[in-house]
Amino acid sequence: MTATTSDSPRLARAARRPFSGSLGKVLLPSSVLLLSVAVWEAVSRAGLVNEIIVPAPTAVAQELVGMLDESYFWEATWVTMAETLAGFAIGVVLAWALGTVLGMFEGARTAFYPIVVGFQITPRVALAPLFLTWFGFGLTSKVVMAATICFFPVLLNVMVGMQGVDPAARTLMRSLGASRWEEYRKLTLPSSLPLIFAGIKNAITLALIGAIVAEFVGASQGMGVLIKTLNFQLNVAAGFAVIVALMVFGLILYWIVELVDAKVVHWRNHA
């Protein structure tokens, strides 16, 4: 069957952009990653860098495969993922609730937003010892750290999303007698969801960073502790292996949130 006239522009655009499809979105980053790893391996084998400082990718892969059979690795993974997910959930819920209030009520925004910004610009590493003093060396301090570090992006995106609603649509809703709740549920929330999910996707990566930073400062379990221990032992290849595992786990969490985003904000894909 020949292509119709209406299909011609679409086919022409696809021909000009060979990597724009789903397959291209997989092949292009995979090719870049493989090329980078190949260059890294070649540099290591050529002896241009000290393997104690920068081990070869094959050595890192060997260490990672060996760790997958070790219980201590999965115990550390479980602790870090629990801290990350708990902190992410708490941070997103609180940020969404506060962002909604600040977005809907100008008085609340004027009163509280400068305080929130001031808290955001405070370095989290400086707060980590304080959290340890308040909440101890257990799980709670790591969850609080993860929650605080992922809080602001969601809060900001909720506020910006709500303020970016079409004023004409808002006026129409009010002229039809819609209550504030109906306006939020039927107009404000759907309009702001794309921007909110952009903040949530950023938040899941920041939550993982927050958990690792808190483990570096003070903890007895977790992948951050495992990285510190391996580096103190000068087992740099194993330390790199844990970092690679962290990257993989972070990508999985990000893709899960992205999948939820695609399901919830489904109308955006057909725009």
Image (spheres, grey):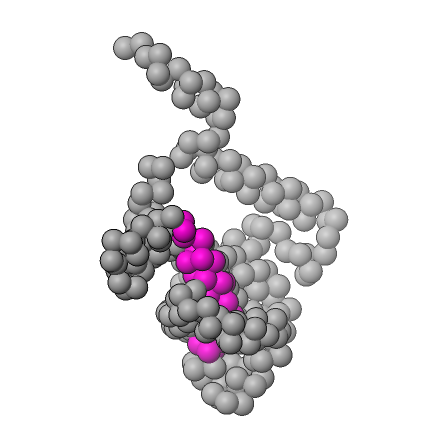
Q: Quadrant of the C terminus?
A: top left
Horizontal arrangement in the rendering, residue 121 relative to residue 264 (left or right): right
Out of 169 and 5, give the one closest to the viewer: 169
| Residue 269, quarter of the rendered image | top left
Residue 153 falls inside the magenta stretch:
yes
Residue 56: % across, % down: 62, 51
Q: Is residue 15 above or below residue 122?
A: above
In percent of width and height, residue 94 lies at 40, 72
Residue 27 placed where, x, y %? 47, 35
Task: Look at 53% across and 86% down and name the residue there.
Answer: 132
Magenta stretch bounds = 142-167
The rendered magenta stretch, by its main secondary structure, is classed as: helix
Residue at position x 63%, y 45% from top? Answer: 41
Kindly tell me whether residue 175 is visible in this rendering.
yes
Instruction: Residue at 46%, 31% (x, y): give it.
Output: 20
4 to 36, vertically: above or below: above
Q: Locate residue 254 relative to residue 213 in the image: left or right.
A: left
In terms of image quadrants, where is residue 183? bottom left
Front residue (pair 14, 264): 264
Q: Residue at x 36, y 17 (%)?
A: 7
